[in-house]
Image (cartoon, grey):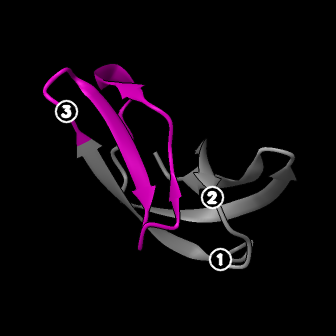
């Protein structure tokens, strides 16, 4: 089990416990970013060895900070 953090700009788009789809965006440089679809939240940058292979996850927790909202997504890998 792996837990990854995604930045969400607006609240109320998803709920804790909800299953979500994850898509991968890659650049030629070997760096990858991920989206919780449909463009709900975005990950940071991952290198090739850190890639997320699974395309589905479950929202473990939604955190609210002064910088916005963050999703902690549990991924089965």
Q: Which mark is residue 36?
A: none
Q: Earlier in the sequence, mark 2 or mark 1?
A: 2
Q: Earlier in the sequence, mark 1 or mark 3?
A: 1
Per the rendered image, the range of residues in magenta is 26-52
Question: Compared with residue 15, is residue 2 higher up or lower down, i.e. above or below?
Answer: above
Cα separation, mark 3 vs mark 2, equals: 22 Å
Label 1 Cα crowd, 10 Å radius (few <14 / some 14-19 / many 20+): some
Question: Looking at the image, which residue is at 43% across and 66% down?
Answer: 39
Q: Nearer the viewer, residue 66 or 29?
A: 66
Residue 54 in percent (x, y) is at: 37, 53
Cα separation, mark 1 vs mark 3, equals: 28 Å
* Residue at mark 3: 27
Cα separation, mark 2 vs mark 1, equals: 10 Å
Label 3 Cα crowd, 10 Å radius (few <14 / some 14-19 / many 20+): few
Question: Looking at the image, which residue is at 72% across and 77% down?
Answer: 15
> Is residue 27 within the magenta segment?
yes
Q: Which mark is residue 8?
A: 2
Q: Is residue 48 left or right of residue 15?
A: left
Q: Is residue 60 left or right of residue 19?
A: right
In the picture, which quadrant includes the N terminus?
top right
Q: Which mark is residue 14?
A: 1
- Determine whether the residue tagged by mark 2 lies in a helix, strand or loop: strand
């Amino acid at each position: 089990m792996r837990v990854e953090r995604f930045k969400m700009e607006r609240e109320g788009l998803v709920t804790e416990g909800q299953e979500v789809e994850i898509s991968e965006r890659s650049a030629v440089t070997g760096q990858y970013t991920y989206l919780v679809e449909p463009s709900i939240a975005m990950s940071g940058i991952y290198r090739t060895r850190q890639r997320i292979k699974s395309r589905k996850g479950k929202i473990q927790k939604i955190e609210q900070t002064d910088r916005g909202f963050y999703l902690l997504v549990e991924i089965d890998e």
